[in-house]
Image (cartoon, rainbow, N blue to C red):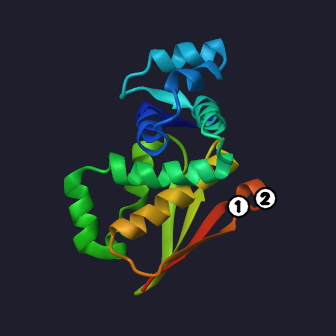
Amino acid sequence: MGQTTARSLLCIKTFLKEKYPEVDHAKVLKRLSEADQASFKALTEDHWVPYDLYFNLLTAGAAEASCEVHQFCQEFGAFQVKHDTEFIYKMAIKFGGPGLMVMEANQIWKRYHDTGRFYVFDILAKSAKARIENIEGGGPMLCSVVLGFIRAGLELSGAKDFSVEHNRCRNRGDALCEYITQWS
């Protein structure tokens, strides 16, 4: 089973505070099992945690915010790329445009996940395709986070009138997840 960095879980708390200020984080944690609560309370940024804990926290956050879980995950993915990307990297993406984001996709992926590879191909002036391959675990919620992350990355890069389509998905029976991006 794959893992994500604890930074992702800690960022969910910040996301809730900024996007859903009416949500009490203590109530979100109470929706978790006792084991998950204990794991969350022991987190430091350098920990890696199983996807299950990550998905359980996203589900609890969505429920407490009265938001559909996949919409919540997309919003979180977008928030994470904007919030957790260092200022200097944001500037590089802004000046490098969508092409830089595309070239750095796998490095960004490895920052948050211990499994899988984010592979970008068919790179053209105003479009690209990306695949997530060889991932252990994950699920539809991860796909939603990735969708939001890609959209926000394109926005940060200065892309205009962009679209992201999740045309192939392991969770719909395909061998891998594939995203098609276009921008102007």
- Mark 2 and mark 1: Cα distance apart in space: 5 Å
The x and y percentages for residue 17 are 43, 36
Compared with 99, 56 (above or below) is above
The x and y percentages for residue 12 are 47, 37
Q: Residue at x 56, y 60 (%)?
A: 147
Amino acid bearing label 2: Arg
In the rendered structure, find residue 172 and report the number of the disc placed on it. Answer: 2
Which image quarter: residue 159? bottom left
Mark 1 lies on a secondary structure that is loop
Q: Residue at x 33, y 70 (%)?
A: 157
Q: Nearer the viewer, residue 145 or 138?
A: 145
Mark 2 lies on a secondary structure that is helix
The x and y percentages for residue 127 are 48, 82
Q: Nearer the viewer, residue 115 or 31?
A: 31
Which quarter of the rendered picture does the N terminus lie within? top right
Query: Which residue is labeled 1 in the image?
Result: 169
Compared with 183, 136 (above or below) is above
Compared with 152, 23 (above or below) is above
Q: Is residue 120 left or right of residue 176?
A: left
Q: Nearer the viewer, residue 162 or 72?
A: 72
Q: Nearer the viewer, residue 135 or 23?
A: 23
Using the rendered image of the protein, determine whether residue 134 is visible from the camera's viewpoint.
no
Q: Tell whether label 1 touches label 2 (CB within 8 Å).
A: yes
Amino acid bearing label 1: Cys
